[in-house]
Image: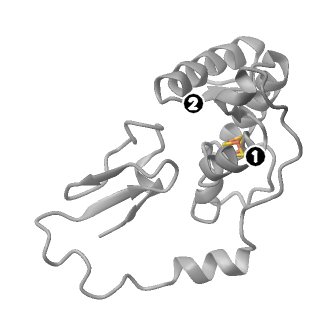
Amino acid sequence: MNSFPPSENEVEIRYKKLDREAEEGGYHLNPDREFTKNLVKGLLVNEKRFGYLSCPCRMSWGNREEDRDIICPCDYRDPDLDQYNACYCALYVSDAVLQKKVLVSSIPERRPPRSERKAVAQQEPVPGTGKQLPFPVWRCRVCGYLCARETPPLVCPVCKATKDRFERFM
Ligand code: SF4
């Protein structure tokens, strides 16, 4: 059972877990340990408060459906890593940052406004897609991993995002 606020020990354990999973998936946590552990602490606080790892740098609605795109790792991590060498919070950084070839600077918010997010969520799937395939294809919204099976995996084998972060691709 996690305590509230999270203890140093809980932060350390989660930090090590996230670090191991990041490295296994080809990602890197920010090498500034104190900075990173503060973000991990924010994630744990949100997990306790909302029941999921809502981004520690963004306002949460306290509703998983509304916040699905900002459950860490969020849908915007990879494009921000590509473009800015770090995610919005700078919890995750690129190889170039790790090797001190570039510095992290401020990262603009990529998340669309709520009205746009709702409009996209209400879009109907393209008629006829997937009908000729023996299995539907699911895409991880976080890292782009694709798999063809009846249902999405419980956890993305690449980035560890949970099942509800997958969308029907074909
Ligand atoms: S990956 Fe996304 S949700 Fe996680 S800390 Fe970075 S910006 Fe926030």
Residue furthest to the top: 9
Spatial separation of the CA atoms under disc 1 and disc 2: 14 Å
Question: Which residue in the structure is indicated by mark 1?
Answer: 84
Ligand 1 location (quadrant) = top right
Residue shown at 84% from the left, 18% from the top: 34
Q: Is residue 50 visible?
A: no
Above or below, 20 against 161 in this view is above
Q: 103 or 39, which is in the foreground? A: 103
> Picture coordinates of residue 117 (x, y %)?
64, 74
Residue shown at 39% from the left, 48% from the top: 145
Residue type at mark 1 is: Tyr
Q: Is residue 20 visible?
A: yes
Checking the image for residue 162, the label placed there is none
Image-quadrant location for residue 92: top right
Q: How is the image coloured?
A: one colour
Q: Is mark 1 within 8 Å of ligand 1?
A: no
Residue type at mark 2 is: Tyr
Disc 1 secondary structure class: helix
Above or below, 51 against 140 in this view is above
Above or below, 8 against 107 in this view is above
> Picture coordinates of residue 31 (x, y %)?
75, 19
Image-quadrant location for residue 47: top right
Q: Nearer the viewer, mark 1 or mark 2?
A: 1
Residue furthest to the front: 101
Q: Residues within 10 Å of mark 2 (few under 14, many from 20)?
A: some
Residue shown at 42% from the left, 37% from the top: 158
Question: Which residue in the structure is indicated by mark 2?
Answer: 27
Could you tell whether 132 is left or right of 69 in the image?
A: left
